[in-house]
Image (cartoon, rainbow, N blue to C red):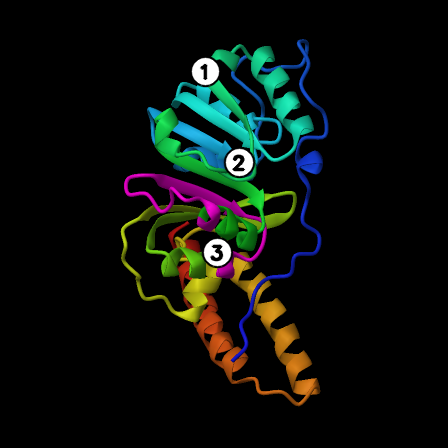
Amino acid sequence: MTTFDEDEKGIPTPECLFPEAPTAETARSDGPALDRRLRTACDLLPEESVVWDIGTDHAYIPIYLLRCGKCTAAVASDINRGPLEAAKRNAELYGVSERITFLLTNGLGETDPAAYGVTDLCICGMGGELIAEILRASPYLPQAGLRLVLQPMSHGYDLRCALRKDGYTIREERLCKANGKIYAVIAAEYTGAQEEYTEAELLLGRQDRTDPLWQPYVIGFRHALEKKRQGRIAGRLDTAYEDALALELDAYLAESKKIIEKRGKRV
């Protein structure tokens, strides 16, 4: 059996999303301007949370959360010293450095999130496979009561499979569009259960099918699947997996068309 995942080409880098670091003159009073991916991740975090932002880069997420009052304290970590130093400067610029603990570490390293009172882990802007590796590498995870907000740039299928296998329940997913691409943001929590998912649900997530982004999101995956299917046909390889998945996606698209038509009649 083969499995399907999205193409990684054309993924924007953090530098593309934030081309210029803020200065004392350009810094917004309410915190850094976030692109829709990061804003959606912040929206999924609960009030009064203590967030650990893994791979923090410029620390835009914890700074934003602290400035808007949604987060009481934060941990910001990065594997590279340069971005972490930039994160410290940004935190000082926005006046929140005393409420952020900065860690130079790969993932969580050997640190227990509970040591800092962390209630939520946030990992954004990485591939789904890498996010899964980071979670599995920690000796302190999974941890009951610790929420995850994850934004994979690619390989969402692999991330959902890993979460399911490791006993995490996906509580909510939201779609967002940034830099011309549609992304899913996942909120999950450890329950020890392994919920049943169809292949299409593992690929796309259990999204709000009334979301205007749902149809183009499915269409993108359907086109990529057909390209892979045609390649296997050309190579005289079995396409049973692709054929079955295509039927699921086509059913989603037919349902989406009906929702759009019904919405148009109400306008």
Q: Position of residue 53 (x, y in %)?
A: 49, 32
Query: In the rendered structure, which amino acid carries the disc numbered 3?
Result: Leu
Q: Position of residue 42 (x, y in %)?
A: 45, 33
Q: Alpha-carbon neighbours of circle 2 within 10 Å: few (<14), some, or many (≥20)?
A: many
Query: In the rendered structure, which amino acid carries the disc numbered 1?
Result: Arg
- Circle number at residue 159: 3
Front tag of 2 and 1: 1
The image quarter in which residue 69 lies = top left
Q: Position of residue 228 (x, y in %)?
A: 64, 74
In the image, 255 versus 43, the foreground residue is 43
In the image, 144 versus 264, the foreground residue is 144
Q: CA distance from mark 3 to mark 2?
A: 18 Å
Q: CA distance from mark 3 to mark 1?
A: 31 Å
Q: Is residue 256 visible?
A: no
Q: Residue tagged by mark 1?
A: 99
7 vs 176: above or below: below
Q: Is residue 267 visible?
A: yes
- Residue drawn at x 59%, y 62% as measured from the top left: 6
In the image, which residues are magenta?
136-159
Q: CA distance from mark 2 to mark 1?
A: 20 Å
Q: Give the structural element (helix, strand or loop) at label 1.
A: helix
Q: Earlier in the sequence, mark 3 or mark 1?
A: 1
Q: Are marks 3 and 1 in contact (CB under 8 Å)?
A: no
- The stretch drawn in magenta includes residue 108: no
Q: Position of residue 196 (x, y in %)?
A: 32, 66
- Residue drawn at x 69%, y 27% as measured from the top left: 82
Q: Residue tagged by mark 2?
A: 38
Q: Give the structural element (helix, strand or loop) at label 3.
A: helix
